[in-house]
Amino acid sequence: MPGCRGTALVTTTGLFLFTAVAEILGCYLTDLVVKHQRSPWLLIPAALSLALFAWLLTLHPTASGRVYAAYGAVYVAVALFWLRLVDGAPLSGRDLLGSVVILTGMGILMGKPPP
């Protein structure tokens, strides 16, 4: 089926997005406790979020090394989005261009392998 490969890439990308948010949230909550003296109770959802992150990475049928490499690209793009949305920092043209470049790399990595 011709459309299945595109659907798989969209599904994989969506899963990567959820994975990145889980990882960033877990780290962000930990950062709030350690650097900003927020309640240590935040470490509980932080740990749960990081456990969810690790579990989500196991849901991909592709070889783990390829998954981690491709996920890294999505992570960087989501981290920049987080920087803008949560931290309120403006994104530069270099940030946006870098995101496009690495997401293109992710598409290449997760694309259909040669026969």
Image (tube, rainbow, N blue to C red):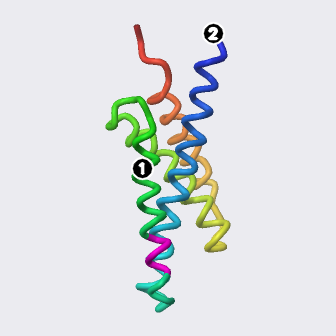
Q: Residue at x 45, y 44 (%)?
A: 71
Q: Residue at x 52, y 46 (%)?
A: 74
Name the outermost residue toward the bottom.
37
Q: Is residue 43 magenta?
A: yes
Residue 23: image x %, image y %? Answer: 47, 60
In the rendered structure, which segment of residues is drawn in magenta?
42-46
Residue 73: image x %, image y %? Answer: 48, 45
> What label sits on residue 1 in the rendered view?
2
Above or below, 99 relative to 38: above
Could you tell me what secondary structure mostly forms the magenta stretch?
helix
Q: Which quadrant would the N terminus be assigned to in this image? A: top right
Q: Crowding at label 2, few (<14), some or many (≥20) Cα neighbours within 10 Å?
A: few
Q: Is residue 104 left or right of residue 114?
A: right
Q: Which residue is mark 1?
A: 55
Residue 4 picture quarter: top right
Residue 58 picture quarter: top left
Q: Residue at x 32, y 37 (%)?
A: 65
Point out the frontmost of discs 2 and 1.
1
Q: Residue at x 48, y 84 (%)?
A: 41
Foreground pick, 90 / 70: 70
Cα distance, mark 2 to mark 1?
A: 30 Å
Residue 98: image x %, image y %? Answer: 54, 48
Foreground pick, 27 / 84: 27
Q: Are marks 2 and 1 in contact (CB under 8 Å)?
A: no
Q: Is residue 44 magenta?
A: yes
Mark 1: which secondary structure?
helix
Q: Is residue 114 left or right of residue 100?
A: left
Q: Amino acid at mark 2?
A: Met
Residue 100 picture quarter: top right
